[in-house]
Amino acid sequence: MKRLAVARLWHEGNSFSPALTRLSEFRQREWVEGKAARAFYDGTATEIGATVEFAGRAKDWQVTWLRCAGAPPGGPLPPEDYAEIRDDILRGLAARHWDAVYLSLHGALVTTADPAPELDLLAAIRRTIGATPLAVSFDLHANLGAAHLAFIDMAAGYKTYPHTDMRETAAHMLDLLVATVEGRCRPRGAIAKLEAILPSFNMRTTDGPMAEVAALAREWRTRPGVLDASLFGGFAYGDSPHAGASALVHTDDDAALAQRIADELIAALAERRDRFHVALPSPEEGLDQALSEGPGMIALLDPADNPLSGGIADTPGLFRALVDRRPAVPTVFAAFADPDCVAAAHEAGVGAVLDRTLGGRLTADFGAPVPVAAKVLRLTDGRFRNSGPMEAGLPVALGRTAVLEIVGIQTIVTESCQTPNDPAYFALHGIDLAATRLLCVKAKNHFRAAFAPLCRRIIDVAAPGPAAVDLTHLPFRFAPRRLHPLSA
Ligand SMILES: [Zn+2]
């Protein structure tokens, strides 16, 4: 019986967010090990879901789940919170000999002390496991460099954005690990970097410049001897020495071929660089466009405060425009993260009217708080299971939540900061999407996986926020200044 160790530390850190990400946010979302991990991820379309499937089918392998920790994207971690997760993983790895190790990382983790702590983690893991084969999967938004590759036997990223192939990415790594342990292949990796930070706004793999280069990578993956070719758009709001897009290619024992393919993919990305930069309408212009559309649901997205880019669910720009306009059509706003407001709503009860402010709670940098008279419509425990295509089946806990009516707008307020990108999120809140005309959401591309088929049109608007589409105003400290657009 061969032994596989599995561990996970998944977090995308926005270096420009004022809200630190604490261990409590991991504990609330994904914080399991051993048999509890197997039960938690069983049947889910996630990386660790793939390891559960593997444990069921690979009869000559025994799988052990060490610490598996994941939190929604957010601000940097305090160093001691990161160290607790790292040390959990290292303790598990040091406890015995393993034949192979699989690690699920994001690739854009940051702490307040270290702009690239995953390098520290990988180095420590390598010291602990010696020459044991190590496979790692990353998010498509990983900020990677050659330094990461030095510690890894094989690695791959998601091929889709919205990310709907987390399970497949991990399954591919597990198959390659087994082939390596059995001596059927010798993975050789190479990385190439783009001299640019790309905003993720126009990075979908369904259409546009990233889709074109993704098609080239897909073509390369069908060639003999090519084990994997992954494109990483990078995470623009992760201020790291390894910022910028990259291509990571693994071949069977042919390092020169891997490098040639990686270079070719980056050249293709470089040709398309400027198409990643787009200009968006203001919230007011977006509202004009939405209200002039024909029947059906129109989504208005505020990507600058998208929690899945490290947004804080607190910027007031789009909400203020809505309140000023008072749209005379069924309108939903999702969401503000405001634990005090949720507590006040639960205490006052359904039907009560609260005088409060919403937005601008953590910082006034992105606009002042909006005063509201809010009638409590509904209260929930914030628990549901994803029903859309992304992380399907995964349980979600928002903390307690409330639906407030503010000048006719059904406004969702939650205790934790998470993006509304699954239909079950709205079902939990008693929102009838079929009867909704304006769906205003702090979200970006992942939203489209479930909602593109439900919306007549999706309009992104530009409002101030920690994940603003214009990168040149952000205070980068660690990303190399030669990278476009910082160099511009
Ligand atoms: Zn991502």
Image (cartoon, grey):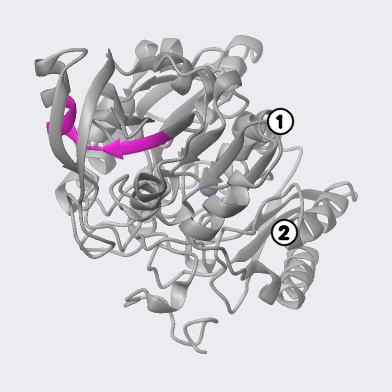
Indicate the position of residue 410 as horizontal and vertical percent values: 38, 28
- Along the line of sight, which residue is nearer the eye, 55 or 357? 357
Crowding near the residue tagged with mark 1, few <14, some 14–19, many ≥20 C-alpha atoms within 10 Å:
few
Residue at left offset 51%, top offset 55%: 142
Query: Disc 1, ligand 1: is the CB inside 8 Å?
Result: no
- Please tell me the numbered disc located at residue 178: none
Q: How many marks?
A: 2
- Along the line of sight, which residue is nearer the eye, 88 or 213? 213
Read off the magenta span: 333-342
Asked whether residue 331 is in view, the answer is yes
Q: Is residue 416 above or below residue 59?
A: below
- Left or right: where 86 falls relative to 454: left
Disc 2: which residue: 210
Q: Residue furthest front?
A: 328
Residue at left offset 21%, top offset 58%: 368
Q: What amino acid does circle 2 point to? A: Met
Q: What amino acid does circle 1 point to? A: Pro
Q: Is residue 35 above or below residue 296?
A: above
* Residue 246 forms part of the magenta stretch: no
Residue at left offset 75%, top offset 63%: 209
Disc 1: which residue: 453
